[in-house]
Image (cartoon, grey):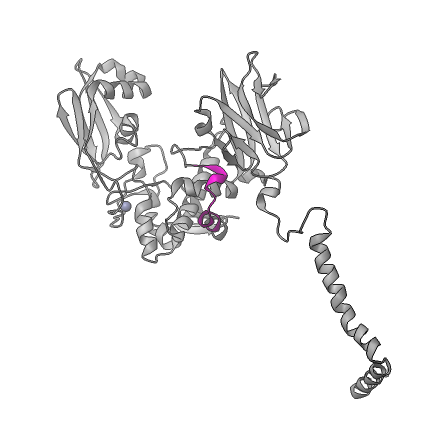
Amino acid sequence: MHRPPIDRIHLTLRGTWRSLGRSRRTIVVFTPFVLLTILAVGCFTFSDHGPRQVVEKPDRQPPKIIMDRLVRVRMLGPTRKKTLKLGVSSEYELRAGPGGRVIEANAAPLDSCVLAPAPDGGIMLGEIDYPESDLFITPRRDASIILNGTSTYRGLLRIVRRGDKLALTNHIDIESYLKGVLRGELPKHFHRESFKAQCVAARTYVLYQMRSSTSDRTFDVYDNEGSQMYIGVTGEGDKALAAVEETAGEVCVWPNGDVDTLFCTYYSSACGGQSQHVNNVKPRDPDVPPLAGHVVCNDCYLATYYEWDPVRVAKAELTKRIVKRYPTVASIGEIRGLRPKEIEPGGRIVRIQLDGNNGTNETLIGEDFRLCVGGHNLKSTNFTIEDDGDAFVFRNGKGFGHGIGLCQNGMEVKARRNLDYRAILKTYYPDSEIRKLY
Ligand SMILES: [Zn+2]
């Protein structure tokens, strides 16, 4: 097709423009601006739902459900309260257990009400007595589950009656779960690289627990120090959210030949100078190089419990606490003597012998002994024992926690010395690598 030369097109357009006259030319120039302005204002003023949001807030979306990324968190915290209250701030579906019969497809939002075992064996939710012993709540919007009026959780909620008690389990996407773990585990002032290192460790830990779960278990992790501290939406500060996003899907692995092996990324508050071998505390766990211990840490000395004050425990009280968890120990009578049977190079007691007043004895793993006495009372297994008549005095205490793997206080000092989260993780889990799993 014949096209006129470009300069001829230009001249033709100029002639047409001049022929329009001044008032028409003004209309032609300003009309597009007026139309665009009306359009823009309309988007914000004439919408049914107020100004249009470009990005929808996460808690206005439904909970994320990717089956192999759904972690089941046993909520021990809330169930320990005398009165358990539940609210759901959006519409929700109620089923008789996960995958069970639909009881209510579109229940109205629920104001905080008492959740309790019903007299006839079912579950009471406010005034309603459900005959089922297993209820499963899927909210229409994320972050809608409110426990005891103050704690908000993402994901779904399962309520199971066991005897005269209720067990609550939060089914939640791993990435959403991690948002509620980071501030449960770290103080707000910790460095952003610490948050990222903690995030990768916590993600690996929970994935390892999920993959190790047997089919008869109804949950993967506890919401407390038995697994990882999980405090729900309450903990979602900027650093936590950024750490989850910036490390999305990343985990620690041990490259075992051609196979990347996921391992249990244990961590504790302050190692007190060096980490210990995983099998000292968990004899059945796989013996993998990243958890072999002996990682020297000169960075947690500023931690509050790098060294702790002597702890005095009466022998009668000590016996009571140990028998409560290990009833067979009752056979040795009252504990009159304590003897470390094995001490690891860092100074921790690996195994401890309990001498009873009837001449017999029992041996416990040091860490199990510590947890019986109280993990916050006896802060580590690195101590000396003094017999003081009716009581034992634990002196020269060092470190806080079991001391396997990552040392959180050491991590923080390293982060402030500009080590990035990858370098920190490789230090505390030797021979490990970071991989993006999803
Ligand atoms: Zn340390």
Task: Report x, y in % for residue 161.
Answer: 53, 19
| Residue at the (40%, 52%) spot, across then down | 192
| Residue at the (17%, 22%) spot, across then down | 391
Please indicate, yes or no, whether residue 257 appears anywhere in the rendered image. Answer: no
Task: Report x, y in % for residue 199.
Answer: 43, 46
> Of 346 and 89, which appears nearest the observer?
89
Taking the magenta stretch, the answer to whether it contains residue 427 is: no
> Of 318 and 274, which appears nearest the observer?
318
- The quadrant holding residue 310 is top left
Please indicate, yes or no, whether residue 242 appears anywhere in the rendered image. Answer: yes
- What residue range appears in magenta? 230-242
- The quadrant holding residue 327 is top left
Taking the magenta stretch, the answer to whether it contains residue 232 is: yes
In this rendering, is residue 66 above or below 159?
Answer: below
Task: Look at the magenta stretch and give its main secondary structure.
Answer: helix
- In the picture provided, is 168 more to the left or to the right than 418? right
Task: Report x, y in % for residue 366.
Answer: 25, 30
| Residue at the (75%, 66%) spot, across then down | 34
| Residue at the (35%, 56%) spot, across then down | 419
